[in-house]
Amino acid sequence: MSKLRIATIARDRIAGDRSGITSVCTAHPIVIEAALLQGKAEGTEVLIEATCNQVNQEGGYTGMTPAHFRRFVSGIAERVGFDPRRLILGGDHLGPNPWKHLPAQEAMVRAEAMVDAYVRAGFTKIHLDTSMGCAGESLALANETTAERAARLASVAEAASGNTGSSPFYVIGTEVPVPGGALESIDNLEVTGPEAALETVDVHRKSFAAAGVSHAFERAVGVVVQPGVEFGNANVITYDREKAADLSAVLSKMPQFVFEAHSTDYQPAEALRALVEDGFAILKVGPWLTFALRQALYGLDQIAQVLDAKFSEHSLCAAMERLMLREPANWQKYYHGDATELRIQRHFSYSDRIRYYWPHPEAQAAIKRLLSFLQGRTIPETLISQYLEGLYPAVASGQVSADAISLQLASVRRVLGIYARACRRSS
């Protein structure tokens, strides 16, 4: 069922079905659980993606290989009763990016090993991104070089899929800015030109044919473009469908494809729906989900301090501040300003660099203290209204339980619900 949905998304659009798919980009267990619960409630597939830096054959920054990640997600799915046939796993920006400091040939050999590991682990949505230069090369490569390297990786994926019983579907192209997100404020963006999108498809088609994998290109379903959406540390550029009209219109010349939009986090609901209607049918979201989780955790942290003033000595926010100051590598080059501005960004930036710290043992210990304190306590609705205002209506109506775990899941699902409504099949 999941493969069928991916396979037919462009054809469905041509037939007048303006629906989409949410791509959940995360390795956080609470966010994954929320996504699976949302999919279970909606009766839809759930697409969960890992990036090349996050998960690879060397472990990535999560310490997980693709096989480990699959077991990790599948375990959560089993626990919440989500049908594994509706689970789609994807690999995002698969290419030499984690090893771009190496010479191209060496980086590509490692990228081949990564793609092989992803496909053998059962990942069926493969985004091939070989656009970045490696050691001694320019920052951005010529389209032909990018496409040749992508075809090389597709050849590896096809060979690996022979052992899995399922053929992968491909996404090609890349967005601007490069993977990893904006470094600071974003004021304006250049929408991908329609001719550039057509050229991306054309050079990849030719390179796949030259590599003897035209059959793989037939399963290419998406092209990553920049529709004019992005977020910085404190601002969001909202989708303007007039500026993207020419790009949207060019889909009529490439009926095999829909567009994949990255960095759609924090877009208003109407903007997300407009993106889907205009052919940007694969919506990627990640930081907004962990941002929502952090909102819930910090709200619970405030509630704990109201319930017992002594809990301020064990504040989660203070613990995270100490950790981020002592280990600044994950935020230092992304955040700028005076001491106050930096402190605000560390905790509340749209870029949500704090998400890289949640797996840290100190962060986990601080969360455990908070949840242990709240366990068995009745959280007054009035405090939820004060510190978790967005969740108050659902709690007051009995839709969400007033316990710490339920409130975390509900906070993430509020965001996922926006995406679910944007992506629903038109009636």
Image (cartoon, rainbow, N blue to C red):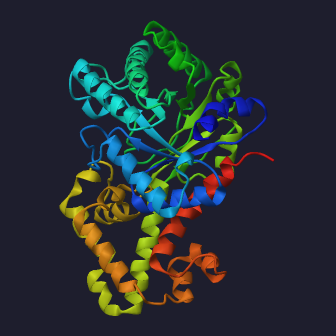
- In percent of width and height, residue 397 lies at 67, 81
Which residue of the protein is positioned furthest toward the left in this rendering?
Answer: 326
Between 137 and 20, the one nearer to me in the picture: 20
Q: Is residue 425 visible?
A: yes
Which residue of the protein is positioned furthest toward the right in this rendering?
Answer: 427
- In percent of width and height, residue 86 lies at 57, 47
The number of numbered badges drawn on the structure is: 0
Between 176 and 404, the one nearer to me in the picture: 404
Instruction: Kindly identify the residue that appears in the image at 29 percent across and 60 percent down.
Output: 359
Instruction: Kindly identify the residue that appears in the image at 41 percent across and 63 percent down.
Output: 348
Instruction: Kindly identify the residue that appears in the image at 58 percent across and 24 percent down.
Output: 193
Between 52 and 261, the one nearer to me in the picture: 52
Q: For residue 226, which quarter of the picture? A: top right
Q: For residue 398, which quarter of the picture? A: bottom right
Task: In the rendered view, tell whether residue 137 sits above or below residue 80.
Answer: above
Task: In the rendered view, tell whether residue 226 sits above or below residue 355.
Answer: above
Q: Quadrant of the N terminus?
A: top right
Is residue 337 rendered to the left or right of residue 412? left
Q: Is residue 268 visible?
A: no
- In percent of width and height, residue 9 lies at 66, 34
- In percent of width and height, residue 304 lies at 39, 85
Task: In the rendered view, tell whether residue 324 sits above or below residue 114.
Answer: below
Task: In the rendered view, tell whether residue 110 sits above or below residue 404.
Answer: above
Is residue 225 rendered to the left or right of residue 101? right
Instruction: Kindly identify the residue that appears in the image at 28 percent across and 64 percent down.
Output: 339
